[in-house]
Amino acid sequence: MAKFRNLLPALLAAAALLGGCVYRPDIQQGNLLTMEDIRKVEVGMSRSQVRFLLGTPMVSDPFAPHRWDYIYRMQYGRDRAVITAHFVVWFEGDKVTRVETRDDPEPSRKAREAKRKKKDESGAAAPATASAPATTPASSNAPSPAPTTAPPAPAAPAPPGG
């Protein structure tokens, strides 16, 4: 019984420490469409042409067969950031009559990170004053190249008769 008394506080401490180590996967739902894909849909296209370009719609309401909804949602795990896009194609009969973009597709995660990094760099450079020495990327991180001594160029031959 004494063994369990020492084990209980250790287990409680381990559970408290490991409680913050929860994996949250990225959750992607729906049709990922780019603005380029959306621009390809034109008035007068048939349902099969739209399905070929964009895929099967996420929501195809049997009570509103004249409307196809393409919805995309991406939730990044630890980030808790959510990207949504909503695109609606309206039909009359079998032909597209109208195309509606409700939420523009956001850039990809890599593009968002690059944008955030660029913003951080520009934000860090903004407080610099005119008296601070300017640095270039080549001189700040990379070692300067060693000077090379090239052999002197051969003298051009004198023109004949001169």
Image: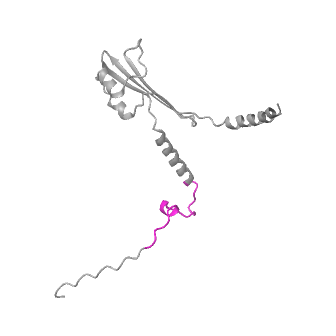
Q: Is residue 63 above or below residue 69?
A: above
Is residue 128 left or right of 66 when viewed as pictured? right
x, y percentage for residue 11?
74, 34
Coloring applied to the structure: one colour
Residue reaching furthest left?
Answer: 161
Q: Nearer the viewer, residue 54 or 151?
A: 151
User: Which residues lie in the magenta part?
Assistant: 125-147
x, y percentage for residue 159?
19, 84
Q: Nearer the viewer, residue 29 or 112?
A: 29
Total residue callouts? 0
Residue at the (55%, 50%) spot, across then down = 123
Residue at the (30%, 24%) spot, across then down = 49
* Image quadrant where residue 35 sits: top left
Quarter of the picture holding the N terminus: top right
Residue at the (46%, 35%) spot, across then down = 106
Q: Is residue 58 above or below residue 77?
A: above
Residue reaching furthest top?
Answer: 63
Residue at the (47%, 42%) spot, across then down = 110
x, y percentage for residue 142?
49, 62
x, y percentage for residue 76?
53, 34
